[in-house]
């Protein structure tokens, strides 16, 4: 089945609410093996909305419209459907009962304005709405099914799951679309794609890379008659990707880098402490976002002033004077100092220039050094980030988590060997 989704509402065009309905419906249709070809957002304009419905019906088996089923004059979706298909709207007792029950449960009479919600195309099926006054409409016209759903998610989601889903399952014939997402970090999208480019031409399952913040996600999607059949298509492709990108692959589906690092630290019985300058505690925040983090996280410090680098971490004054706070020597001393101070297995030190000011020709904004003391062996890396202050801080913590992950799974790189001396 091919589907076309129309999201109605001028407020969506103004960017006022986030259109979560499109995300939800796209995900749920995919589970049914229904291909969502297009998503269109249309304002509260009868001519434009009816034209969108008309165009959607030309190439789709299923046209869904969300929003515009209320009782006010700008709720025009029912009228737009009638105009698009050149059909009348008639009184529908099922729709009246949905509206009536809503007000009856509150001990009120039905306001006259709500009588606009009593109508539907002749022969349409009414979808119940226990959470609002807007009845849904399911209408088969020629070879296309048109479904009108309310806009508020608290009404749309229950209506979809309880009323529409059983009908769509019948139409979809038991087909499902299943996706698995493999997550890699420490490698850019072009390099990752180069390693698996032959797999990107597969038809079923498909493989599609997506760039996320500091990560590349590889989505494997299969369509088959049932979940197990879809998994059988996905699994050999997943094995092949794991073989080619294993050192960079940290998780799948909903797993985050922080969660994976936490699992490895617990499993290996290791502890960590961090000393941060330019990241301002963000790395400690991400490491401690995981429940049970007290089992592996011992100490975090934010040391901006050189005085505290010396007094708390034992960074030699001559190192700071000769090489500066932003240097590989200082990052090395910070990592070693925090590990020794906390008595942990691992120490991490981060120092850099987050900007937007403070940069020089020799040490520009975005220059960051990362030190990692792994049970007494210290490695240091240098990176030049770009972006806003927030971007540089976040990228630096992502980099630190990637390096920590790589050491935990045995694929960690040693010191990059670069020096500013």
Image: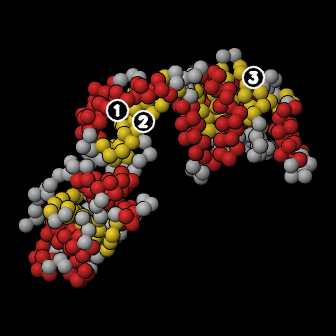
Alpha carbons under labels 1 and 2: distance apart: 8 Å
Q: Is residue 209 left or right of residue 312?
A: right
Q: Is residue 271 left or right of residue 147?
A: left
Quarter of the view holding residue 183: top left
Which residue appears at 84% of the width and 32% of the height?
94
Q: Quadrant of the N terminus?
A: top right
Residue 154: x, y in percent?
68, 47
Q: Is residue 303 left or right of residue 159?
A: left
Which residue appears at 65% of the width and 41% of the height?
157
Query: Label 1's element?
Result: helix
Quarter of the view holding residue 79: top right
Q: Are marks 2 and 3 in contact (CB under 8 Å)?
A: no
Task: Judge by depth and name the residue closer to the eye, 354 or 31.
Answer: 31
**Viewer-nearest of labels 2 and 3?**
2
Label whose residue precedes the other's in the sequence (1 or 3): 3
Label whose residue precedes the other's in the sequence (1 or 2): 2
Q: Quadrant of the C terminus?
A: bottom left
Query: Label 2's element?
Result: strand
Q: Residues within 10 Å of mark 3 (few under 14, many from 20)?
A: few
Query: Label 3's element?
Result: loop
Tell me the residue that label 3 is attached to.
86
Alpha carbons under labels 2 and 3: distance apart: 43 Å
Does residue 48 appear in the picture of this structure? no
Q: Are marks 1 and 2 in contact (CB under 8 Å)?
A: yes
Tell me the residue that label 1 is attached to.
238
């Amino acid at each position: 089945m091919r589907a076309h989704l129309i999201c109605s509402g001028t407020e969506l065009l103004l960017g006022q609410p986030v259109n979560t309905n499109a995300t939800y419906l796209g995900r749920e249709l995919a589970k049914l093996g229904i291909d969502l070809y297009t998503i269109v957002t249309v304002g509260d304009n009868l001519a434009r909305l009816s034209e969108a419905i008309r165009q959607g019906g030309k190439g789709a088996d299923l046209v869904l419209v969300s929003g515009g089923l209320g009782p006010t004059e700008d709720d025009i979706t029912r009228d737009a459907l009638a105009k698009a298909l050149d059909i009348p709207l008639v009184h529908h007792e099922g729709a009246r009962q949905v509206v009536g029950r809503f007000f009856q449960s509150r001990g009120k009479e039905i306001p006259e304005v709500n009588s606009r919600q009593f109508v539907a195309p002749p022969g349409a099926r009414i979808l119940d709405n226990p959470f609002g006054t807007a009845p849904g409409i399911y209408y088969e016209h020629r070879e296309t099914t048109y479904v009108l759903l309310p806009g508020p998610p608290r009404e749309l989601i229950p209506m979809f799951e309880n009323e529409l889903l059983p009908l769509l399952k019948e139409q979809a014939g038991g087909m499902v679309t299943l996706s698995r997402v493999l997550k890699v970090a420490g490698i850019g999208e072009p390099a990752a794609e180069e390693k698996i480019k032959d797999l990107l031409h597969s038809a079923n399952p498909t493989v599609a890379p997506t760039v996320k913040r500091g990560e590349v996600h590889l989505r494997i999607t299969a369509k088959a008659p049932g979940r197990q059949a879809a998994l059988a298509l996905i699994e050999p492709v997943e094995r092949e990707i794991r073989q080619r990108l294993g050192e960079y692959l940290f998780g799948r589906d909903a797993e985050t880098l922080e969660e994976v690092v936490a699992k490895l630290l617990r499993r290996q019985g290791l502890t960590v402490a961090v000393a941060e300058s330019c990241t301002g505690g963000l790395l400690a925040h991400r490491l401690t976002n995981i429940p049970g983090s007290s089992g592996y996280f011992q100490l975090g410090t934010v040391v901006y002033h050189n005085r505290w680098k010396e007094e708390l971490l034992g960074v030699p004054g001559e190192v700071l004077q000769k090489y500066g706070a932003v240097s590989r020597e200082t990052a090395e001393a910070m990592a070693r100092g925090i590990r020794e101070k906390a008595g942990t297995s691992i120490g991490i030190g981060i120092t850099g220039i987050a900007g937007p000011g403070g940069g020089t020709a020799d040490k520009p904004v975005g220059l960051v050094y990362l030190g990692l003391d792994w049970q007494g062996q210290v490695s240091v890396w240098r990176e030049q980030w770009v972006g806003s202050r927030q971007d540089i801080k976040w990228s630096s913590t992502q980099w630190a988590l990637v390096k920590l992950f790589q050491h935990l799974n045995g694929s960690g790189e040693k010191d990059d060997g670069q020096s500013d001396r």
